[in-house]
Image (cartoon, coloured by chain):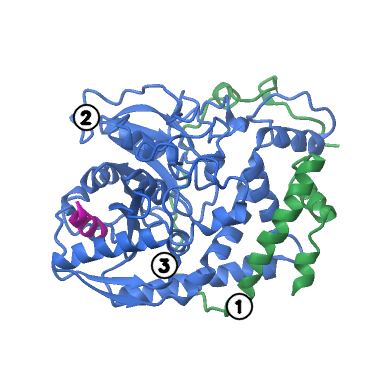
Chain colours: A blue, B green
Amino acid sequence: MADTIFITDERIDGDTDADGPLAGCTVAIKDNISTEGVRTTCGSAMLEDYVPPYDATVVSRLKDAGATIVGKTNMDEFGMGTTTETSAFGPTDNPAAPGHVPGGSSGGSAAAVAAGEAELALGSDTGGSIRCPAAFCGVVGIKPTYGLVSRYGLVAYGNSLEQIGPFGETVEDAAALLDVIAGPDDRDATTRAVELDGESYADAATGDVDGLTIGVPTELVEGADEGVVDTFWDAIAELEAQGAEYHEVSLPSVEHAVEAYYVIAMSEASSNLARFDGVRYGPETDADGNWNEAFSAVRKEGFGDEVKRRILLGTYALSAGYHDKYYKKAQDARAWVKQDFDEALSEADVLASPTMPVTPFEQGESVDDPLQMYLADANTVPVNLADLPAISVPAGESDADGLPVGLQLVGPSFGEERLIRAASALE
Amino acid sequence: MSDDADAVDTEAVRHVADLARVDLEADEIEAFTGQFADILEYFETLDEVPEVEREADLTNVMRPDEERDSLDREVALQNAPETEDGFFKGPNVS
């Protein structure tokens, strides 16, 4: 079924007595975020029957805020993909562009908001997995600064890169969900307390861009499709008309961001996914033999192709003789990307680019060409390498094919309010 | 630098699958060998990255080591395919 938005269609009522900020709001949750008593599959056969015994911190906060959770959404297996087609539960159609992929890996969450199945949704973004589906489905998605939102209860894939973040139909909606999930958590030592300029993230959605300076990294525009580029410049012109000004900047390091990202993400994946041994959770198999044999057999059955590919390549990149060549160089590239962004953001308030260099792929178009898929992440992965916040906001439709185009804004560490203010000017 | 990329043959894929504890079918090994050659060749461009001074500004986050509730044993075991006497049951180690 190409219209699978939810893997598990189960309602979890929040604290209904509470006069919480999300009372009466419906929220869809990506299926790699743990929900007590409701199965959490990560889009994988490996966890088809896994029922978490505890809630992720973000889920507890949603319940306390009075939200109603309407289901667990489809996703690329363990977050590994750009189309939601690597899910063991089948693909999800794009409500904004039927017959096309919703993007990934949080494709079900973006589709849930676009289709009106939920007012809000949570996804996770390791290399673009919130921003890509937001752009493809014509909704708003925020990838918070690393450390703003607790990852406790998020099933880890690339834990030095990923953050949980919100989707909404409007910037203000997404920001209001960020208000509920952001903030320190003693169960995630990487979280930090942040001093806001205003009352809340939602309050920042004023649309005031008068005097805003926008840097446009040429490297992130040049590689995009013509229709995407035209739509992008139209959006910049609209911001200019409202008092913003732009200049072009160069980020030479981003030419190496995709390979650096994939080396780091795959290496972390190979380690994080070692926990799936079929003993503490996982499918029952008739595998005989010793630990290693049984372990290898359950992983053969439980993991799909893309997950196997990334675990193997990550293992390769970390293996003796290759560690310095791949992993260490990737860390150098990561530090270089950070420096480039810091420099560009010292002369601009925000950086703007197309979120994705392409419009949504047709279903099945590229599932068999992994390298081509990876290259589609060129504009989103640098932000994860730099630990920075970013938002994807609808910029309109491409003239070439009439499909949705997203504008990505990147800001300084913990500068979410600035991004929310600027993005809301496009609504 | 091309000898590393050339080194990705079916034997290398089989070896890394063994290290990663993932059994593969013959046709998967075949498909991965071609794909890995392409992907690793692309990763080779990391050679062009200059050495970068990495001065991460990190602080340890400490908390008091206090007792707190943890999962009940029964709950912790609820997802295990096999248990025995309140323990996870795995295959023999050797």
Label drawn at residue A23: 2
Residue A420 covered by magenta stretch: yes
Q: CA distance from mark 3 to mark 2?
A: 40 Å
Mark 1 closeness class: few <14, some 14–19, many ≥20 residues within 10 Å: few
Determine whether the residue tagged by mark 2 lies in a helix, strand or loop.
Answer: loop
Q: Please name the residue shown 64% across and 50% down the image.
A: A310
Determine whether the residue tagged by mark 1 lies in a helix, strand or loop.
Answer: helix
Instruction: Specify the farthest residue to the top.
Output: B85
* Residue A152 image-quadrant placement: top left
Q: Is B30 on the left or on the right of A213, as rendered?
A: right
Q: CA distance from mark 3 to mark 1?
A: 19 Å
The segment highlighted magenta reads A419-427
**Which of the two residues, A225 or A324, is positioned nearer the viewer here?**
A225
Determine whether the residue tagged by mark 3 lies in a helix, strand or loop.
Answer: helix
How far across and how far down the image is residue A185, in percent? 38, 46
Say what amino acid the circle numbered 2 marks: Ala
**Which of the two residues, A43 or A288, is positioned nearer the viewer here?**
A43
